[in-house]
Structure formats: C-alpha cells, structure tokens
Image (spheres, helix red, strand yellow):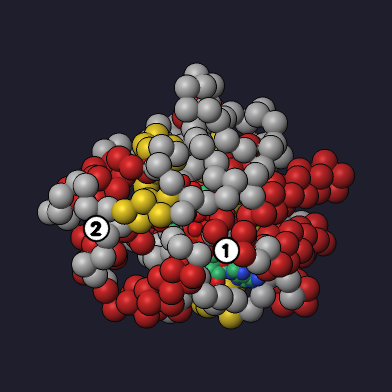
Amino acid sequence: MPTTYLVTGGAGFIGVNFVRHLLSHSDADVVVLDRLTYAGRRESLAGLPAHRVRLVVGDICDVGLVDSLVTTADVVVHFAAESHNDNSLHDPTPFVQTNLVGTFTLLEAVRRHGVRYHHVSTDEVYGDLELDDPEKFCETTPYNPSSPYSSTKAGSDLLVRAWVRSFGVQATISNCSNNYGPFQHVEKFIPRQITNVIDGQRPKLYGAGLNVRDWIYVDDHNAAVLAIIERGTVGETYLIGANGEKDNKSVIEAILRLMGQPESAYEHVVDRPGHDMRYAIDASRLRTELGWAPQYTSFEDGLAATIDWYRANEQWWRPMKAATEAKYAKVGQ
Ligand code: NAD
Ligand code: TDX
C-alpha cells in the first residue's frame, strides 16, 4: 500500500509545490485539506493525477472533518496558515484562529489516532538580527517573535513541542527562511514586484530597503521537509535555509535587471510597522544529520526561472492582482 499523506494548505504556495514534489519523488497518495481562502487556489492543483491526489475543501479548525481525515492518513504535513505579515497587522483575527486553533485541532487528532505529524514553520519565530550580527538563527535560538503572524506561528510551534513532551505525539518541526518560486501569491514581495513590472508599474520598496531576507527556492524547502519526515528524529526541530541572504533593495534591482528595466526604476513606499531587520539561518544540522543540500544555489537563476513562470502563467495570477494592489494602495504601500 502506498503511504497516504494528509497535506493541509496544499492549495497554497509551498503546499502545492510540496504535493508536486511528493508525487514525483515517491509513490505516495495525497489528500489535500484546504479551505481555499484568498490564498488557496484550486487551479494550482489542476492537471495532477486524480487517482493520487484528492482535494477536500474544508477548515483545519473543523474537529469532525479533521478527525475523519487523520484516521485515513499515515502522515500529516501541516502547511495551512494565514501567512502574510502585512495582513496580520490589519486584522490578526484569522491568524489566531487558523495558526493556533487550527494547529491545536490537528494535534488533538494525531494524538487520538497515533499519526506521524510534521509541522511547517518559519524563521520569524526567532525575531530579527542586526545587520552586522555575526550569529545566525539555530535550533537553540530563543523565541522572540515581532508580528501577529510570527507570534501565532511561534505559539503553534510551542503547542507542538508540548504535545510531543506531554502526550508523546510523533512530531517534527521545521523553521524555514523566505521562500520564492512558482504559485506564490502576488501579495508577497518577489511576485508582487515581478507582476508590477509586467504591468508597467514600478516595484514598491518598503522604507530604505536595507532589510535582509534569507531566500530559498521552494523546492529546496520541500526536499528538506521530505527528508525530515523520512529520516528526521521525532521530537526534534530542524532549521531550513540555503545561505541566501539578500537585502530587499538588491532583490528589486535584480528583478528589474533580469526583466530588462533600469535598476533604479522602483519607488520607496511606507515602511511596514515593526519591520524585522534581518533573518539568517544556520542549517548545519539538516546538512550534517540528514544529508540535505540545496539544489538551487544561484539566486539569479532561481529568480530568472520565477520571472519566466509568472510571464507564462498570467492567467493564474491575474485574478488576484487588482484587489491586492488596491489593498496596498489604501495604506500607501
Ligand atoms: P499561503 O498563504 O500561500 O498558503 C496557505 C494555504 O493555507 C492556502 O491554500 C489557504 O487556503 C490555506 N488555509 C488557510 N487557512 C486555512 C484553514 N483555516 N483551513 C484550511 N486551509 C487553510 O502560505 P505559504 O507561503 O504556502 O506558507 C505555507 C506554510 O509555510 C505556512 O505555515 C507558513 O507559515 C510557512 N512558511 C512560509 C514561508 C514563506 O516564505 N512563504 C517561509 C517559512 C515558512
Ligand atoms: O511590496 C513589498 N515591498 C517590500 O519591500 C512587500 C510585499 C514586501 N517588502 C519587504 C518586506 C520584507 O522585508 O520585502 C520583504 C519580504 O516581504 P514578504 O514577502 O511579505 O515576506 P516576509 O514578511 O519576510 O515573510 C515571509 O517569509 C517568512 C512569508 O510571507 C512568511 O509566511 C514566512 O514565514
């Protein structure tokens, strides 16, 4: 019998790339549980083999639904979340509900049925670093989240840790840095700027743009998640990152250059309140213990492939673009 994976949030950016990665790297069957919020798209799963992938449209906070799906799964991989920092500053309500109550609901179900669980989280739980700090985040860095988004992700990680220790739940956690690649919502930094340039609009840089993010191509993240599920130690946390630190200004300049525009053709807009300065990941443990290494080691090549994908898939992102920009325009971003 092939392994059955229950993938929450499998119609969102990283989740849908994970489903595709799993289908091509294993003989597993997949059940996707996704509420199809503004961030989840049925279209992202189009063309996948129907005998291996089933989409269940529903909420991870629905106790009965989650229970019935968990009983049929060998592994639960939990991607579903409210994921955008800017949205969490305007209305934190769904962040508390989905990220905390949703994770609690899944944990109770895997506890009842003894199912293996992997929890997908973020480096933002550690807060931020100064630009000149020689240290990077590692598995023992204390939690210090800044935003409603990152604090609810931090809370969800702590629930997992407590359920492992108190109830013996068979769980692992991963905290990854900023992802980029196909199927990412146009509210996020890189796809927003690529689609702005396609539309003849100037990219929008928050503040001075000195903030640093540690970029990783989404397939490298997902290969690491699969390695942790297959070879990781239950109860442990693994950090995922590919030494991809770049400041936002340089990323915008690279996008403009690769899209044949002058590097200076962007504008500065209102900064994000409480904007984290820098994230940086030390992924030594993942590399040495599990033998993982990123395949996409050139940011410029990954960015060029991502630009090609948005150019070729306008029908995928176009329906989301105008509403996203209207929301940003209201707050001067
Ligand atoms: P996303 O916003 O693109 O997708 C989230 C998905 O979850 C959507 O399909 C949405 O419909 C679904 N969802 C939301 N609420 C739900 C609910 N209550 N019930 C069922 N489904 C629901 O997010 P993403 O960027 O793919 O992030 C996936 C996970 O990875 C998140 O847990 C996020 O915290 C984590 N993460 C993201 C990044 C990044 O750079 N994007 C980095 C590290 C970790
Ligand atoms: O238009 C923009 N201009 C800009 O300068 C946008 C949308 C963002 N930014 C800046 C803010 C950040 O410093 O770019 C950087 C990246 O922004 P986001 O794409 O919103 O990502 P970030 O806030 O860093 O969080 C992301 O990485 C960690 C994901 O959205 C999270 O889900 C993940 O946990």
* Structural distance between the alpha carbons of marks 1 and 2: 24 Å
What percent of the width, then of the height, locates residue 87?
A: 57, 63
Which residue is at 36% across, 37% downward? 246
**Left or right: where 145 falls relative to 192:** right
Q: Is residue 8 visible?
A: no
Q: Residues within 10 Å of mark 1 (few under 14, many from 20)?
A: some
Residue at point 62%, 64% (across, down): 90
- Read off the residue under disc 1: 87
Residue nearest the viewer, comparing 132 with 169: 132
> Is ligand 1 less than 8 Å from the beta carbon at label 1?
no
Which quadrant: the C terminus?
A: bottom left
Relative to 102, is 181 on the left or the right?
Answer: left
Q: Residues within 10 Å of mark 2 (few under 14, many from 20)?
A: many
Q: Is residue 321 visible?
A: yes
Q: Mark 1: which secondary structure?
A: helix
- The label on residue 307 is 2
Residue 199 is left or right of residue 171, and the answer is: left
User: Please, is residue 86 above or below residue 207 in the view?
Assistant: below
